[in-house]
Amino acid sequence: MMHFHLLGLTPNSGCFPPDWLFDEPKLMDPEIYKHVSVGPMCRYAEDLMSSMKILSSKSGTKLNFQKQLDFRKLKIYYLKEIKSPMVPSVEKDIAEGLMKAVSYFERVYDTKPREVKIPSLYDSNRCVFNILLETIKDFKDLLTCGKGLPFNEKLDFLKCFIGKSQLCFGTLFTFNFAFFPLWYKKSQIDRYQKMLREWIDDFDAILDEDSVLLMPTLPITAFYHEEMLLKFPSSCYTSIFNVLGLPATHCPMGLSREGLPYGIQVVGCKNNDPLTIACGMEIEKAFGGWRNP
């Protein structure tokens, strides 16, 4: 979403049924649907609101889109960065964009934004990775969509460097290194489950029906081709809200000094998707939103 300069929403968990997420839901442990969700992407915030009204009504999820919002009563919190191993520092343009959004609400609506720090997110990458991997029944079946392709994943990984592999590099990289001991240890699952409960407590203490958290969507702008595999730890900025089941709306903030799109995300408490979208509409009004490339 950020790299295409679009608005997008990751809805709270359970908003859409499993067959909306995967072609072969039987390949996944039902537990994963608490931690994985998909949502619409749109050029304009009002379309995002309309899309969610339609999609949530079809899924049976009850979201309050009729609530009148007074931004003067909104509690704004912001998180400048997540300090975690292998996660790059937030780029200057993104950091400045975050503070522009914070200052906008403070100046226009006389809110009193408050910075928060969440030390429990330090090991967020491995926590998310371990929890998600534990919900996968058969990794090979998952990555081949249940087709059971007969191939040697290690040999196919070598073949991809000369363009002769059956699967793409990203899939094969995940296949061969997902269970690498550096980031996955089955013996640590209980510790990560406890860490997840700590996150729930931390975010419950911050977020309620009248508050949002502003933070970077990713710490850096667009990646080079396949670079995301090396900078995968950056995904903790978004993946933590997948495993927590909290709604988060990405909001474009403009272009970086290199002409690349960047943005921030607005996070709300569970079932408060409409508030995050409403904030996205306000940020779009203030900073221009989507622009024709």
Image (tube, rainbow, N blue to C red):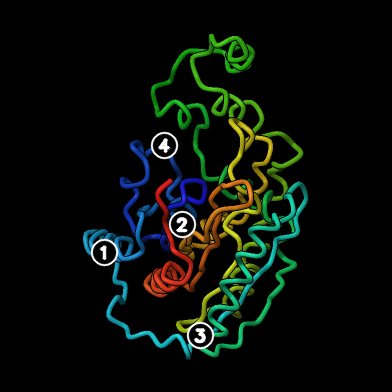
Please name the residue that numbered disc 3 is placed on. Answer: 108
Residue 65 as seen in the image, left or right of residue 77: left
Q: Position of residue 80 (x, y in %)?
A: 68, 67
Q: Amino acid at mark 3?
A: Val
Q: Residues within 10 Å of mark 2 (few under 14, many from 20)?
A: some
The answer to whether the residue labelled 1 contacts the one labelled 2, judged by CB atoms less than 8 Å apart, is no
Instruction: Quickly name the residue at label 2.
Output: 34
Q: Between marks 2 and 3, how big is the CA–CA gap?
A: 37 Å
Q: In the rendered structure, which disc, 4 or 1, sits on the residue that comes first in sequence?
A: 4
Question: Which kind of residue does numbered mark 2 sit on?
Answer: Lys
Sequence order check, earlier mark of 1 and 2: 2
Query: Which residue is label 1 attached to?
Result: 50
Q: Observer-nearest residue: 288 or 121?
A: 288
For label 4, the crowd category at 10 Å Cα-Cα, with few meaning under 14, some 14 to 19 and many 20 or more, is: some
Looking at the image, which is closer to me, 58 or 189?
58
Question: Vertical placement of 166 versus 216: above or below?
Answer: above
